Image (spheres, rainbow, N blue to C red):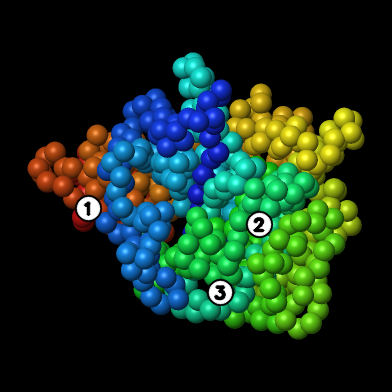
Amino acid sequence: MSVRRVMGIETEYGIAVPGDPRANPMAASGEVVTTYARAHGLRAAHGAWDYSDERPLVDARGFEMPRARADLSQLTDAEDPTLANVVLANGARLYVDHAHPEYSSPEVTSPRDAVVWDRAGELVMREVVGRLADRPPGINLYKNNTDGKGASYGTHENFLVSRRTPFDRIIGGLTPFFVARQVMCGAGRVGIGQESERAGYQIASRSDFFEAPVGLETTFKRPIINTRDEPHADPDVWRRLHVIIGDANQADVANLLKLGSTSLVLALIEAGANDRSLEVLHPVEALKVISHDPTCRATVRMRDGRDLTAVQILAEYLQMATAFVEREGSDPATDEVLGHWERVLGLLDHDPMDAAPDIDWVAKLALLERYRERDSLQWGDPRLTAIDIQFSDVRPEKGIFHRLEAAGRVTRLTSDEEVRAAVAHPPQDTRAWLRGRAVEAFGEHVVSASWDSLVVRLPRAGRVARISLIDPLANSRADTEALLSAGDVDDLVAGLGA
């Protein structure tokens, strides 16, 4: 059993134009994408993305929603020539999604790599903000999930899961885990309710925006378990679990736990080793009950009649994972996740504030409480909301999280050097290697790209070829480096047999 599997993170960034609250967010987001693309010699046209294999209305429960019934926001395969879209040299996608600039990390095979390439996205956004600062009024970007006024935007995780695993088993095994997981990886938010209509502080910024246990939607009637069945891989072998319930994490430990603990729970579910007695009676309500209690003492009713805290629920999952690993064997990546999982749960159980160096919501709460004590502020004070927003500012001199990290008050698992390298280079052990290197080496000949394809123009052959990337673990550095360095794009395609 291992945490290792194909995974990645998509992050929509909050966006603001200083001094212009009525600025068009889609236009501003397009400026973000095109500014970065121009600076790096990349083509930012919408047609640069290959939509031919995308089917966003296929539901994992065994049906496909008719397009006539779908909300416009669900039609992610519908091309809009006005929206900017670019594939980066590190294999990531940078584009405009729902009026926000989104960085979708390349596919990786470990939680730690997911953290590294997610942080690379922060550097991409930081560079854009710096470039636009020379063109007043500029644009500010925030790694958060809500503006505090009723708008919420997503940070989604993606995990490849065996197609042999029945989806109802995934729903049953993951629902209580997702209800509880927020205490380890919530980003925190000032305000209770979707529009912050009540004063207070809560653990997760997104919990108040979820309204259903299971569903296909992502921008309305948000479900705890999203059923989109769009694997971007061989559909006979894999399904892609599209997780929409997470927050945008800046803390390495929280981000590692978000990806790593979920991967371990999926491994339990795939093996049939999870305890199905862990079932929350009213998961949507329970999600909010837990988020609204930063003491981590609130309990939710389980199907078996027990009243458990989020920490107790996660401790049961941890026990199952630990026992399974002891039986089946482990690896360093798995041991790292299990070690942090056990340590953080211990901190949360004793006193949540002890977890401030590791968990976003605790670090933010500790800071806000100092302001509240110093200036006698109530939770409804707008100054606290402003601090909440500033906490996630991508600029190192403005973003409060970055200042805490620079002062050594946040646990760091990654290094600046490896994150900078991840901005320019793709992961070596997935198909992202070929996608990123092809864009860098043969960019003028790349017609379009997607997670599972590359369409290139062959100047010598005088034709267009489509390279299939259907296997996420093929076309890695070991598979393709010699082909990439030996010749031109015609030679690459010939070598791949496309």
Give how far apart the Cα atoms at labels 2 and 1 are.
41 Å
At 64% from the left edge and 48% from the top edge, which residue is drawn? 195
Figure quadrant of the N terminus:
bottom right
Q: Nearer the viewer, residue 108 or 25?
A: 25
Residue 201 locus on image (x, y percent): 77, 48
Mark 3: give few (<14), some (14-19) or many (20+) Cα within 10 Å.
Answer: some
Tally of marks: 3
Which amino acid, mark 3? Ile
Label 3: which residue? 170
Label 1: which residue? 466
Label 2: which residue? 207
Secondary element at image label 3: helix
At 75% from the left edge and 77% from the top edge, which residue is drawn? 302
Q: Is residue 234 left or right of residue 139?
A: left
Asked if residue 336 is positioned above or below residue 214 in the image, the reply reads: above
At 57% from the left edge and 74% from the top edge, which residue is drawn? 171
Which amino acid, mark 2? Ser
Residue 128 locus on image (x, y percent): 48, 28
